[in-house]
Image (cartoon, coloured by chain):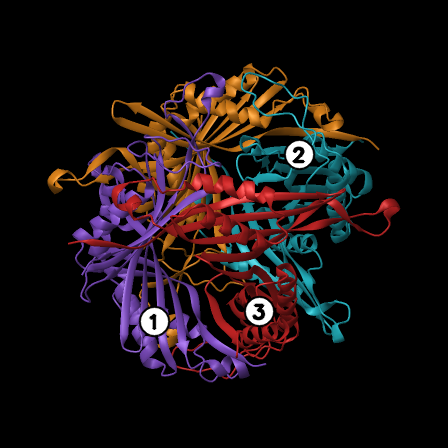
Chain colours: A red, B cyan, C purple, D orange
Amino acid sequence: MSVILSQNNYGKSGVRVLKVTKNSSVHEIKEMNVNVQLEGDFDKVHTEGDNRKVLPTDTMKNTVYVLAKEHPVKSIEEFGIYLAKYFIENNKQVSGVKIYIEEKLWDRISVTGENNSAAVPHPHSFISRGDEKRICSIIHNKNIVSVSSGILGLLVLKTTESGFEHYIKDKYTTLKETNDRVFSTSVKAVWSYANQEVNYARVTETVRQIILDTFAKHHSLSVQQTLYETGKSVLDICTDISEISASMPNKHYLLFNLGQFGIENKNEIFIPTDEPFGLIEAKLKRDK
Amino acid sequence: MSVILSQNNYGKSGVRVLKVTKNSSVHEIKEMNVNVQLEGDFDKVHTEGDNRKVLPTDTMKNTVYVLAKEHPVKSIEEFGIYLAKYFIENNKQVSGVKIYIEEKLWDRISVTGENNSAAVPHPHSFISRGDEKRICSIIHNKNIVSVSSGILGLLVLKTTESGFEHYIKDKYTTLKETNDRVFSTSVKAVWSYANQEVNYARVTETVRQIILDTFAKHHSLSVQQTLYETGKSVLDICTDISEISASMPNKHYLLFNLGQFGIENKNEIFIPTDEPFGLIEAKLKRDK
Amino acid sequence: MSVILSQNNYGKSGVRVLKVTKNSSVHEIKEMNVNVQLEGDFDKVHTEGDNRKVLPTDTMKNTVYVLAKEHPVKSIEEFGIYLAKYFIENNKQVSGVKIYIEEKLWDRISVTGENNSAAVPHPHSFISRGDEKRICSIIHNKNIVSVSSGILGLLVLKTTESGFEHYIKDKYTTLKETNDRVFSTSVKAVWSYANQEVNYARVTETVRQIILDTFAKHHSLSVQQTLYETGKSVLDICTDISEISASMPNKHYLLFNLGQFGIENKNEIFIPTDEPFGLIEAKLKRDK
Amino acid sequence: MSVILSQNNYGKSGVRVLKVTKNSSVHEIKEMNVNVQLEGDFDKVHTEGDNRKVLPTDTMKNTVYVLAKEHPVKSIEEFGIYLAKYFIENNKQVSGVKIYIEEKLWDRISVTGENNSAAVPHPHSFISRGDEKRICSIIHNKNIVSVSSGILGLLVLKTTESGFEHYIKDKYTTLKETNDRVFSTSVKAVWSYANQEVNYARVTETVRQIILDTFAKHHSLSVQQTLYETGKSVLDICTDISEISASMPNKHYLLFNLGQFGIENKNEIFIPTDEPFGLIEAKLKRDK
């Protein structure tokens, strides 16, 4: 019998970097978790233990820090492209580079002004925005670079204007129809671009606001409908975006059964649950 | 040989509740994780398997939901006191009740106004504030009720005006002195009260702002000094508070050694780390 | 502009089930976390909020429990196939079903025998095997069913017979070559089958033992080489398997620098780290 | 107003160490997560930012690694005592040291023997035992050293011989009595010693087996009764132990309601849940 090594890749994950940019006394920060993966001429590493073409993952890690120093890191996308180019141009055994970056978000602390005047953003102190993250993937194969961006962990909840009715009833159905339920989801959205020259940060802020506006204002007949409406609005408004995928786990808030104690629950008391959860996913693209 | 059951308690943990309060079309929400623990005349449960005095933890859970319906739940402290009283008054075998509540924080979503006018807070849609939590503990022993409140997971970072110098050097010292480092911590603060009639929500907002103001504005010579300064300011400003404990893990951001590649690191490139971490704790009280 | 819904799927995740099988006084248990995803004629759910073809995810959940009662659940693969068939046969709007199951592993507790005789496995008491899991994916598209199986979280460590040498040195290299290092990884392996009639549980046990044997006995020149050797041995021995993918994160144990204190570290004192970590992945298949 | 610093302590947490001991070709490993906390004359650090008496937490970390090299680390207790002594003897400003250690457990990999003979334990390759951990706390105040040991995360489940009946029924009771339920818990047990010369590892193995034997063999009328029986057996058998505390979260496996579909659930199909959970705690000591 003989065996074929049909695919392989390797790299470094979890390279955490904080870049501080100091313009006068106002500091900007960018905190990233960088992942690098390489493909290429690495068969003999596997089959013979021949490491002569291996760029060690430890060196990838060092390189990320040095390049973060060299590059302004205005956006994770631009930094990711810069990293990918470096690895492919400096390693001729490499045919493909994948960079995946997660950005941890920090907001400026709003401090009390002098003499208790209005709050002001502080020049060098920051507070975490929590689990919400920015992400990007850069795939650099030979001469082609593809970029996608995204938002992870945007956790939202609405207390009305969401329902779920008229679905299939079969022998295992116990769910009650409702035209008024709590709807909570942790949105993940990932999109790719129609153009190469993009203001990534601005696009991302626009997508984020569309997600929030749609979630809040749209009267939802199902998670699917809200997801579709969100994607459609993004494609309507952001001409830089060619395709968007979204995932909306339905984080169920179950109505507690007060009725068993003779009390009416007017959509006031809910049990937040983590599992099981509905998982709704779709991809939308522009019709050319 | 004989054995003494020197202490015992039991209860329900992880009772998650969302309470929605609907005043006209503007909704308020309170999401809590409630823990109930009872002490009392329960020796025979252990020694003989005699359950006749046991209030099942499942019943505690149901009770939490019913009482959340009955009570306005303006603050977790008031709701916790209400819960504790219920359990002690309705179970004569119980000598002590401990209620611990963690509140998950939600902010209103800021939505785009009509015709792209200024953003406005939405009446029934919310976004998670992340890992920051409010907590309270209520201990109700016979007729005495003691209340403490707190903040968990307030994650902050400053990029300058923090140093650490003049410490002991011994044979295992390798740390370099610095008058300019990144300082990041996830603040936990817990306080107890000098008075019984307290606007808990307002006190907590004041403490939170003092923590943020002190962290941002105080030039730190050590985590200890920042922690002390924070506690002192709280006791200065909040006359309702008699004692405050705080914990500040030092979430180290290590300067990456660019020097090994002939590049100077002017406090620009750091390695965020989770462990090991310094842990600094102190308790301050008012001198009577 | 017009928008195309290019892909969509939905289902229930995190459906946790314990099935207890009682043969005489000896009990068997199977604990699973089941995920169901459907594709099909669901466009109008998204575009019009028309739910008439939607099987609610809550009904999927109920169905999982009922079918777990009906089916013997000897292996997660057989149960997954049974589930997939049920959904596709009972929902004509559905064109594809994906079932993903994670099995939590329990071993029998070994109890002290009568009169302190040798330990014996207990008939109805179990102890968790920790983070190691069995997984399977069933994809049922129209008439074609494909099955893959896997192992997750098999965490191992060896203290010698692992090295890493002769790799590329460039201007950002700082890693030292070594022919003797600690090697630790949390193996993930996923394989698909050459045949339809398979004793899934037996194959999985064989793969697991090959992973352990190879990890322990193979003198590793790189993670890649160990991974390849493992995959090759699996394909050599398990004729039921047609293809195997494996992922081996390199969970670095860094040599602590005792030299700075004039002490030699003869590979005795290491710093276990979680991040960054190397990530090595490959896929092997049988050459036809 | 004036403020009193009523308590303070500081130290390093999360110092992870792997110690490899090589006797001939058979290697032993000990993986620990070490926490050091100091109390003493540190008021001016807080009030004046005067660091002259501060042993940096970074130095504590280095010291842990050096001392792990010096000491055989046969047990975490002996190593913890050694560490505590070092810090108190070398820092006259320190009045109290607390060392807390968690040990991650590794078993030898059982490899296939030559010519497929019986499995044998491998001399230098290990597999993780999962979430179960050993712990110890050493408190060294001036001349007094107190030691406690424990087990964390011992996750067990039994499918019968557990019931819960005859408890209080009140207006919020919905739980059904049962004489046959699934009982699962993640045991935490912590004990202190009657003597100073103790074989810590042997005592811990004995306690662990008593926990498992009692859980498996005892017919449980309540979690409380099982917990008490466990503690009583430990005090009966382990004369080195003077006091034991245990915590048994009741990890509920809920009977799925098959009855709503006309199917009987003969204790076969359960829903494993993480929250809410019962939490049962008690402390037992020897009656002198």
Callout 1: SS: helix
Identify whether A135 is placed above or below C94: above
Q: Nearer the viewer, residue C80 or B44?
A: C80
Question: How many numbered circles are shown?
Answer: 3
Q: Nearer the viewer, residue A63 or A169?
A: A63
Q: Which residue is mark 1?
A: C66
Measured in 3D between alpha carbons, the distance from the residue under mark 2 to the one under mark 1, in whole angstroms, is 59 Å
Task: Tell me whether the residue at label 2 lies in contact with that at label 1, contact meaning CB atoms closer than 8 angstroms.
Answer: no
Q: Nearer the viewer, mark 2 or mark 1?
A: 2
Image position, residue B48 (x, y; %): 40, 45
Q: Quadrant of residue B230?
A: top right
Would residue C130 appear left or right of A149 to someone viewing this image? left
Tell me which amino acid carries mark 2.
Answer: Arg
Say which residue appears at 26% left-offset and 56% top-offset: C28
Q: Residues within 10 Å of mark 2 (few under 14, many from 20)?
A: many
Tell me which amino acid carries mark 3.
Answer: Ile
Measured in 3D between alpha carbons, the distance from the residue under mark 2 to the one under mark 3, in whole angstroms, is 40 Å
Image position, residue A168 (x, y; %): 44, 82
Callout 2: SS: loop
Tell me which amino acid carries mark 1.
Answer: Val
Can residue B93 be seen here? no
Image position, residue A219 (x, y; %): 62, 78
Can residue C74 be seen here? yes
Tag on residue B181? 2
**What's the chain of the residue with tag 3?**
A
**What's the chain of the residue with tag 2?**
B
**What's the chain of the residue with tag 1?**
C
Task: Tell me whether the residue at label 3 lies in contact with that at label 1, contact meaning CB atoms closer than 8 angstroms.
Answer: no
Tag on residue D156? none
Q: Nearer the viewer, residue B288 or D99?
A: D99
Measured in 3D between alpha carbons, the distance from the residue under mark 3 to the one under mark 1, in whole angstroms, is 44 Å
